[in-house]
Image (spheres, rainbow, N blue to C red):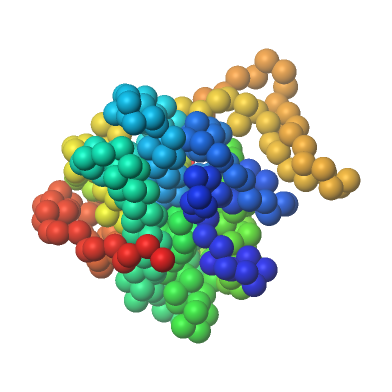
Amino acid sequence: MKVQGKHYRTIWLEGAAVRLIEQRLLPHRFEILSCGDYQATAAAIKDMAVRGAGAIGAAAGYAMAQAALAAPASGFRAALEQARETIRSTRPTAHDLFAALEQVFQAALTASTADAARVAAVQAAEAFAEGNACAGEAIGRAGAALLRPGMRVLTHCNAGWLAFVDWGSALAPIYCAHAAGLPLHVYATETRPRSQGAKLTAWELAQAGVAHRLIADTAAGSLFQRSMVDCVIVGADRIAANGDTANKIGTYTLAVLAQRHAVPLYVAAPRSTFDSATPTGAAIPIEQRHEDEVLYVTGLGDDGALRRVRVTAPGTSADNPAFDVTPAALITCFITEEGLIEPNRQALAAWLQRRPAMAAPAR
Ligand code: MRU
């Protein structure tokens, strides 16, 4: 996607360094963060310099490749296993992270020499990242077919290209439809506590020239009540075998509202987000984040400096679950890179058992 006319991916490998768009500074500053080793890339995932399921999947894959590049030939496997543990422990919910990590780890282990393993690890990490970008584009095409001129689309959090390597999931159909000349209007929820909607989605949509308005999370019900939402498109962090979907906290609220008002709710996600080993949403690990994210807000002061300010009285404490689970029964259908899939165990099992489409070769 383009930032001020220049094409960027959210994350890429340059030599042995992972380079990524520093998302904690957006929309106020556009900077590229360079991570020289796997520990730095793991820290970028944990501290949310890079975030969003697809992007942290790519980051985890690249981090594993960095570990392979740096591992000594003697003790190669032990070094990789240690790195794997570090990367696994960064964030628990997004399935893409674990899928990418395993793909790169296994690719390295199947090679017969350390040199061959390093090459294999880099190739596997690049293949995951390229596959993620290609999936985003295909999700865009599949989802755009659901949109009609003048539709008002509500989205939550950021499942745009910043959450992927490129294109995104929930925003990809909007980008495709917009590129085809379809007039649309997007409502982006603010998405407290980290405000990915306010800080990232609104910025992405502005870069792409898509008409949009930001709403406070608490305004969503009123929009539905006044028939101002024609469909909801959200992304996903992990989808269980029965279709229950973990996504950013607040998605369940929107799904209940959508059902109450007979508005379709689409979940856009690539194959790598579907976790057939997790039977239902109840078994999805939900990340609990630090209470300071609720107690404080960060923004730009009138003097141009980024500042963190406390919202609450001293002594107030907070709960901060990062994700919730939307039951499959509230989902109209999944938008995937291989088309629309019904949200039930049978349809998902049949689809996931089919051979995955090959990712395009890395550029
Ligand atoms: O905590 P984050 O920002 O990494 O959360 C992930 C998300 O942005 C959302 O849950 C999104 O809808 C799915 S990511 C494609």
200 left or right of 363 in image: right
In the rendered image, which quarter contains the C terminus?
bottom left
- 176 versus 315 height, above or below: below
320 left or right of 263 in image: right
**Residue lying farthest to the bottom in this orientation:** 181
Residue at horizontal 22%, vertical 63%?
357
Instruction: Report x, y in % for residue 129.
Output: 39, 55
In the rendered image, which quarter contains the N terminus?
bottom right
Residue at horizontal 32%, vertical 24%?
75
Looking at the image, which is closer to me, 201 or 134?
134
How many numbered discs, if any?
A: 0
- Asked where in the image residue 133 lies, by quadrant, the reply is bottom left
Looking at the image, which is closer to me, 175 or 80?
80
**Residue lying farthest to the right in this orientation:** 303
- 156 versus 175 height, above or below: above
Instruction: Report x, y in % for residue 12.
Output: 49, 53
Instruction: Report x, y in % for residue 15.
Output: 50, 50
Instruction: Report x, y in % for residue 270.
Output: 32, 56
Residue at horizontal 45%, vertical 55%?
164
Residue at horizontal 30%, vertical 34%?
284
108 left or right of 363 in image: left
Q: Is residue 136 visible?
A: no
- 55 versus 78 height, above or below: below
- Asked where in the image residue 100 lies, by quadrant, the reply is top left
Q: Is residue 337 visible?
A: yes
